[in-house]
Image: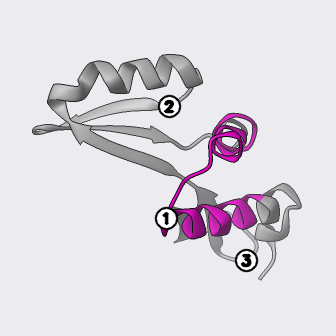
Amino acid sequence: MVDIVKSKTTKIEYSVSLRFMISQHSRDEQLMFNLIHYLNCGKPNKNNNCLNLTIRRFADIDKIFIPFFKKYPILGQKSLDFQDFCRAGKLINRKDHLTI
């Protein structure tokens, strides 16, 4: 996801950040913890019968998450979403997200 939220602390009055989240049924809890351990990033969050893994820290997204999915490509329609996500990451790396 690309989060764009109103912000009173930035010049352009918006804050832009990336967020990756994957959800699985709580019965697959071990799978999610193995993924967190393998990637060495992300935070688990339980919600009813669902376990979410969220990665918000840009350094983790830029140095771990994006290279992982470039090495092991996403197939199907989601690959187009991933390309857009990578483009947003490049904009953030260049600090372009700090401008209108």
The disc labelled 1 sits on which kind of residue? Gly
What colour scheme has been applied to the protein in the rendered image? Answer: one colour
On-image quarter of the C terminus: bottom right
Magenta residues, start to end? 61-89
Q: Is residue 18 magenta?
A: no
Q: Pointer 3: what residue? A: 12
Considering only order in the chain, which callout, 2 or 1, is on the residue closer to the N terminus?
Answer: 2
Q: Which mark identifies residue 42? A: 2
Q: Does dot 3 land on a helix, a strand or a loop?
A: loop
Name the quadrant containing residue 94.
bottom right
- Residue at 75% x, 36% y is 63
Q: Position of residue 38 (x, y in %)?
A: 54, 19
Q: Which mark identifies residue 76? A: 1
Name the quadrant containing residue 82.
bottom right
When the figure is inspected, residue 6 is found, relative to residue 43, above or below; the finding is below
| Extreme residue toward the bottom, this view | 100
- Residue at 71% x, 65% y is 88
Most foreground residue, 26 or 11: 26
Distance in Å between CA atoms under marks 3 and 1:
36 Å
Distance in Å between CA atoms under marks 1 and 2:
24 Å
The disc labelled 3 sits on which kind of residue? Ile
| Pair 1/2: label in front | 1
User: Given contact means CB atoms under 8 Å apart, are the residues at marks 1 and 2 in contact?
Assistant: no
Considering only order in the chain, which callout, 3 or 2, is on the residue closer to the N terminus?
Answer: 3
